[in-house]
Amino acid sequence: MRSQYNLKLPHSVYSGKNSLENIKSILLENKVDKLAIFTDKGIERAGLLNYPMEFVKQTGVDVVVLDDLPAEPTYKQVQKLVDRFKESKADFIMAVGGGSVMDTAKLASILLTDRYGVYELLSRPQLAKKCMKTLMIPTTAGTGSEATPNAIVAVPEKELKIGIVNDDMISDYVILDAIMIKKLSRKIAASTGIDALAHAIECFTSNKANPFSDIFALEALDMILNNIVQACDNPEAMDAKNKMQIASFYAGIAITASGTTAVHALSYPLGGKYHIAHGVSNAILLVPVMKFNEQVCVGKLAEAYDRCVHIEKNCTTVEEKSKFMIDQFEKIVKHLDIPTSLSVFGVPESDLDILVDSGMQVTRLLDNNMRKVTSEDARKLYKQIL
Ligand SMILES: NC(=O)c1ccc[n+]([C@@H]2O[C@H](COP(=O)([O-])OP(=O)(O)OC[C@H]3O[C@@H](n4cnc5c(N)ncnc54)[C@H](O)[C@@H]3O)[C@@H](O)[C@H]2O)c1
Ligand SMILES: [Zn+2]
């Protein structure tokens, strides 16, 4: 464990029924003239932009909508939108979308300059400073991007995704209103929910775990384990959906205070090379990596059991408790019909070397893993999921 740790959070966070109405006071107190709304075509097609727009219109501010963004964009696609944003002369940013949209909006908030762009931040993330305030309205639950200083972009040249970390990207305002995830398809709700679950358990079992991150990671894990199935299976389960939003947000805070580990590290090439959705690639790796890690974090997993399992608490030994938790992850991934192998994505065995090479480059996260991951370990793990 680190000898010092800290907690960094967005300035104001709103949640609960009708919490979108706070948009009005946020825009007014910041004396906004022109609002840049980052979103994507999927959000607009789902009619989701209408909800926040109702309140934006009541303030009378000018609006520019920046929506030309694919899911899990490359750094060049992000730069294109940032350039349009710079031309817009907006003075406040609102993001309405999942992690892809929020990460792009966060990068825009520190890139109101012609001296450098997203590409330069890949190697020198600290170069940029905050230029504009941001309001994040997540539509998935989720990446927790609304809480983190991270933005993740695909780098096709490296067939990898790279995380840019800069504290100035921590958002100023967040609104977690369950209406924004009500119409989320079961498929996306499931994979993004498992992403949040992975954030929580990875941060809790990370080398960087500390008393601050543990509070948020464990509360997130508890809320996710006890709400994810209902939130995904029942479109009307607004309470469970709101709990998933809060849990994703807490798991994002845990990422900021601690850090994800080998699940996320080894999943980066799966997104970068085969464009497998971030939540799906984490879901595929979650159980194999937890089983690999179990020998060094059996006590931590047992602690998570004590904290998060509320009924049929029949396990007594740490080994039983730890096994129960991993079995529980496996059951949830299976119940939610998320693929558990790469075979569905046509990944050939001949790509194994490339996968190992790429995965081993993600040292920023592999270093957080309590059990050291060698190239041979990575090979075995990838082989298990082929
Ligand atoms: N910054 C961070 O801390 C962090 C953490 C984890 C992941 N990420 C990144 O976030 C990205 C993934 O984000 P994501 O999983 O939220 O998905 P996403 O933003 O890529 O969205 C996936 C698809 O779902 C659609 N969609 C989103 N919300 C919807 C809704 N409510 N209703 C209907 N359709 C909806 C979008 O239009 C898109 O087509 C990846 O690039 C990943 O690497 C960032
Ligand atoms: Zn993630």
Image (tube, grey):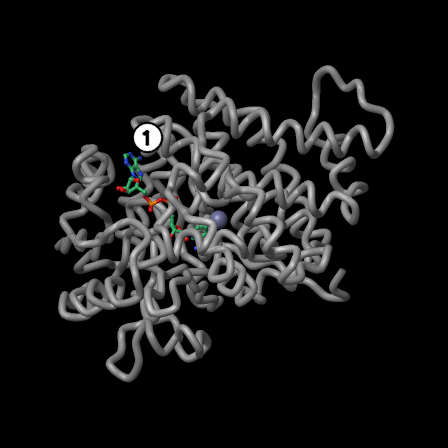
Q: Quadrant of residue 216?
A: top right
330 left or right, relative to 181: right
Task: Name the residue that disc number 1 marks.
Answer: 184
Q: Where is residue 386 in the image (x, y as percent from the top left)?
A: 50, 43
Number of callouts in the render? 1
Q: Is residue 261 above or below residue 165?
A: above
Q: Is residue 167 above or below residue 260?
A: below
Q: In this view, does 308 lie above or below 40?
A: above
Residue for point 26% across, 60% down:
92
Q: Where is residue 78 in the image (x, y as percent from the top left)?
A: 27, 63
Q: Does the residue labelled 1 lie within 8 Å of ligand 1?
A: yes
Residue for point 58% across, 43% down:
384
Near mark 1 (Cα within 10 A), the count class, few <14, some 14-19 or many ≥20, is: some
Q: Nearer the viewer, residue 82 or 16?
A: 82
Q: Which amino acid does label 1 sit on?
A: Leu
300 left or right, relative to 218: right
Q: Is mark 1 on a helix, strand or loop?
A: loop
Residue for point 14% across, 70% down:
87
Q: Nearer the viewer, residue 33 or 125?
A: 125
